[in-house]
Structures are given as structure tokens and as C-alpha cells.
Image (cartoon, grey):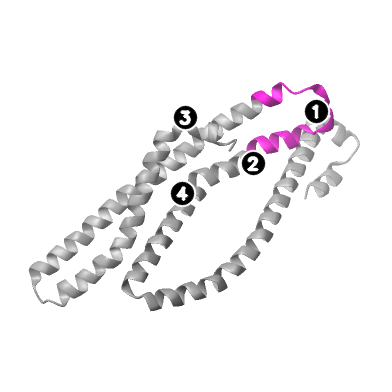
Amino acid sequence: MKLGRFLWPYWRRIAVALLALLVTSACVLALGRGLEHVVDRGFGSGDPRLHDQALAAMIAVVVVFAAATWGRFYLMMSTGERVVTDLRRAVFDHILGLEPAFFERTRTGEVISRLTNDATLLQQVIGFGLSMFVRNALMMTGAAVMLFVTSWKLALLVLVGAPATLLPILLLGRRVRRLSRESQDRVADVSAYVDEALHEIRTVQAYANVRRSASSCA
């Protein structure tokens, strides 16, 4: 994986973020069991002491969840910022070493768009999307295990209905990826056009092409 060499310098931060992610997933799953104890052992028993203990345990879980969520979000977002900074620096150094023929074939605005917009999308994936994907996967696995322990019949019904839910997501996901790729290409074209128009703004105004240039960029 080519992106791995940019992630490796921050493996300690990523490891701590993954640990915090495990803690948050466990806390979310534990809240359901905690609510069960509050109702059964607290309200159901009629003993105020058990009720207070159950509520105290729930509050402790919520506090741990909040702290772990903050740690995960801070570490992943800051790591994403650093990785994208290193990536932009490496790409820029690579661009500076390219032959002049490359810049004759490729417009400068497109190169700038790839260096800025595409890197920003990658930052969102590293800082937010990846952690949310792993967290949801862990929660889904843990919830499935707890569901099997509670009622295997209900778990089987859920598994039977899961493909009906995932199939539309997979089909729409391919279309969304294609549209996203087309959108990025369009953004690169627009950036190249804007860069060219602004760089030669005197020529555009001299030939009275301001209105035409504005409509072409829309």
C-alpha cells in the first residue's frame, strides 16, 4: 500500500486512536446492558442502593465513552492533517522534478486542483471516514455476538434480512463512486480554466471575453 509509508511515521498515534476506538465501541455496546441493569436491578428490585449503583455505573460508562471519543477524534483528525501535509509535500517535490513536456500536456490549474482538492478528500477519509468505518464494523460485530447470545432465532432473522439492506447500498455505492470521480475530474477542469483565465485576465478583457469566460466556467 503506497499510502502506508505516509502513515507509518504516526503508527503510535494511530495505535492509540484504535485503542480509543475499541473503548468507544465497547462503551456503546455496554450501554444497552447497563440500561438493562438499571431497569431490572434498579427499578425492578425496589432497592434504592442497587438503583444508585446501576446509575453510577451508567454514568461512568458515559464518561469513559466521552473521553475515548474525544481522544479518537483528536488523534485521527490531527494525524490526517499531518499525513496529508506530508503527502502534499511529496507530491509537490515530485512535480517540481518532472520534465517540461509534462507541463506542456497538462494544464497548471489541473495540477493545482489535484494537489489541493484531492488531498483534502484524502484527509477526510483518513481523519474521519476510516475511523468511523472501523468503529461501525466493530459495533456491528459486537452487536451480532450479543444478539446471538441473547436470542439466536432473532439473530438468524436479522442475518436473513441483512442482504436485502446491503444490496441497495452496494449498488448505489458504485454509482456514488463513479459520480464522485466525475465530480473530481470536473473540479480539476474548472480549476484549470479559472487559473488560465485569471492568469491571462488582461487578454480576456482586451478581447471582451469576460461574459463568455464566466458562462464557460459555470
Name the N-terminal-most of marks 1 and 2: 1
| Element carrying mark 2 | helix
Foreground mark, 1 or 3?
3
Cα–Cα gap, marks 3 and 2: 22 Å
Q: Which residues are magenta?
A: 93-118
User: Which quarter of the rendered picture does the N terminus lie within?
Assistant: top right
With 74 as the anchor, is 81 left or right in this view? Answer: right
Structural crowding at the residue carrying mark 2, measured as other residues with C-alpha within 10 Å and reported as few (<14), some (14–19) or many (≥20): some
Foreground mark, 4 or 2?
4
Q: Which mark is residue 118?
A: 2
Membership of 108 in magenta stretch: yes
Q: Which residue is mark 3?
A: 9
Name the N-terminal-most of marks 1 and 3: 3
The amino acid type, in three-letter code, at marker 1 is Phe
Name the N-terminal-most of marks 4 and 1: 1
Q: Which mark is residue 131?
A: 4
Q: Position of residue 47 (x, y in %)?
A: 8, 73
Cα–Cα gap, marks 4 and 3: 18 Å
Cα–Cα gap, marks 1 and 3: 31 Å
Structural crowding at the residue carrying mark 3, measured as other residues with C-alpha within 10 Å and reported as few (<14), some (14–19) or many (≥20): few
Q: Position of residue 44 (x, y in %)?
A: 16, 78
Q: Please name whichever residue, 102 or 186, is drawn nearer the observer in this view of the structure.
A: 102
Q: Which mark is residue 102?
A: 1
| Element carrying mark 4 | helix
Cα–Cα gap, marks 4 and 1: 37 Å
| Element carrying mark 1 | helix
Q: Which mark is residue 148?
A: none
Name the N-terminal-most of marks 4 and 2: 2
Q: Position of residue 69 (x, y in %)?
A: 36, 50
The amino acid type, in three-letter code, at marker 4 is Ser
Q: Please name whichever residue, 196 or 211, is drawn nearer the observer in this view of the structure.
A: 196
